[in-house]
Image (cartoon, rainbow, N blue to C red):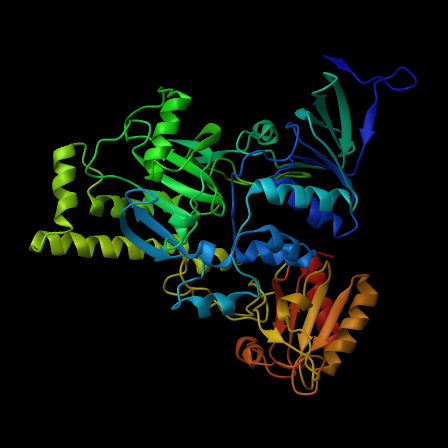
Amino acid sequence: MSSFVGVNGGEQIVEIDLLIIGAGPAGAALACFLCQHGLKGLILAATPSTADTPRAHITNMAALECLRDIGLEEECKRVAVKGDCMQHTRWCRSMAGEEFARIYSWGNDPSRTGDYDAASPCSHVDIPQTILEPILVRHATHNGFQCRFDTSFLSYDRQPDGSIISEVLDGISKQTYKIRSKYLFGCDGARSQVLRQLNIPLAKKPGQGLAINVLAKVDLEEVMQYRLGNLHWVMRPDEDQPAFNWATVVRMVKPWNEWMFILFPRPGAGVDFNPSKDEYLECVKNIVGDDSLKVEILNISKWFVNEIVAEYYSEGNILERQPVGASVVERTNQGLRDHIPVWEALGMMDPSLEVRKMQFAELSQPSPEGAKRRAKLQEAVKETSHEFHGVGVEMNQRYVSKAVYLDDESIRPPLPDDPVLEHEITTYPGSRLPHAWLNTRLPGKRLSTIDLAGHGAFCLLTGIGGEIWKAAAARAAAELGIEINTYTIGWGQDFHDVYFDWTQRREIDDDGCVLIRPDRFVAWRSKTVVPNAVAKLIAVLKSTLGV
């Protein structure tokens, strides 16, 4: 491999402020959020383009709020799948065959709709990486970032002046060259070379085995009429299956003609088998359950369900943007474990076919054993709501740091009894700004409190009698050289609390205030107006900013 040679015969070094390794959802989204602040940089991707297979797809409310903040929510919603298409998760013998159970998913349960509506102005959507990545890369490159594909990160070297020189390989010319940056971000996935060189300790749990993705086209529009949902577990407890397909989760990619068939091999079967394309085709046809439907396989790939999390994610000006493997937060991959009781209730777990037949048959028997197994199945399916209706785990993030001002607070109240299912709505510093719908005195298009905050600036919300906070914010912004957007909410104010939700959720008096960071998390709150409002607000901001 040769190096780029500059015009004067020396080695050429590209100078850039921010270098992001990886153009997937993590890297491209990071670039989008950085360019919102007027920052510029370079994205490198070893791949020749954005994702060519669907990969990650469920995008929750918290993520949509971030995209909303930079003006991408509507574009994503236009191309995403949403609503009834995501209504259920099912367990069945085949896509066209007998159904064992179903559960509402992603906020579609009538008994949970209010929880989701209260938590966010956004809703879950299904947007595969093949669709999301181009949107993110385009936005980043239209707003200050450049992107180079077919470019592999090799290594980095810290310089005495604090800068970082990274060596990269151009995949087309096969030449290496160097890039000097002020910051380096590793967003290059499970096998991150940046993470490897940082030598960050990894917390590893036993993996959950091999999975095989079979991307296929098959028109299931008529089949899906009464089976609406984007995830379908297919299993046959009373039949023997190929070792490479003990159970399958069928994921909708494009309604209703493109699907990802995710095959899970029989426990203990190993990973050495290599079925032919014809064997995969026959397997997919069996999963579909209707021989009259044509199946076209588009792609086959293997991956491992890992639980590996980095113990920390930064070292000075080198930052690892994401954990590695498939585990992102505590409950990632918990979904598979949540399904084990369902599999047990259906009789899937015993290695003996005769035992499995007997256990599965109990579900239809008018006997104590049958009643017990049916109750077990119902309870197991209900428990999967922790995966499919985990609004709490998606929204209950709490920050405790110097960027949160807690000197005026008592001990934080505990999380809800079930912090996975239940979202804590509060203005306690370090929490998400509560969502509440607002409008103006002459009604127009409604907006959320979330829409007032963010956009790269601090935000201060107050109410009747809180005018002094507006003046204090103006003084603080001028003194500190930052932007603070201020609004009053209430009768006759900048915005009306149309459903009185803000009044219920703000946890301050009319003349108090809530200070929100640019990331839409609460930095500080004052229950009521204070005599030294200007000095107090400046002190809080200095503490939060670390100046």
> Where 309 sits versus 269, above or below?
below
> Where 120 sits versus 281, above or below?
below
Q: Could you tell me if residue 208 is visible in this image?
A: no
State the image coordinates of residue 473 (x, y, percent, origin top left).
76, 72
State the image coordinates of residue 13 (x, y, percent, origin top left).
82, 25
Q: Judge from the rendering whether residue 540 lies leftward or rightward of residue 285; answer left or right.
A: right
> Where 391 sits versus 239, above or below?
below
Q: Quarter of the image holding residue 442?
A: bottom right
Q: Judge from the rendering whether residue 35 lies leftward or rightward of residue 272; answer left or right.
A: right
Q: Could you tell me if residue 273 is visible in this image?
A: yes
Q: Judge from the rendering whether residue 9 lies leftward or rightward of residue 274; answer left or right.
A: right
Residue at x-position 33% and y-position 27%: 244
Residue at x-position 38% and y-position 20%: 274
The extreme left residue here reads 367
State the image coordinates of residue 7 (x, y, percent, origin top left).
91, 19
> Where 308 sits versus 171, above or below?
below
**Number of numbered discs visible in the structure rendering:** 0
Q: Quarter of the image holding residue 388?
A: bottom left
Closer to the camera, 395 or 244? 244
State the image coordinates of residue 239 (x, y, percent, origin top left).
21, 34
Q: Quadrant of the C terminus?
A: bottom right
Closer to the camera, 468 or 217? 217
Q: Quadrant of the N terminus?
A: top right
Closer to the camera, 59 or 522? 59
The extreme right residue here reads 8
The extreme top residue here reads 1
Q: Judge from the rendering whether residue 332 lies leftward or rightward of residue 519; answer left or right.
A: left
Closer to the camera, 1 or 465? 1
Residue at x-position 18% and y-position 36%: 350
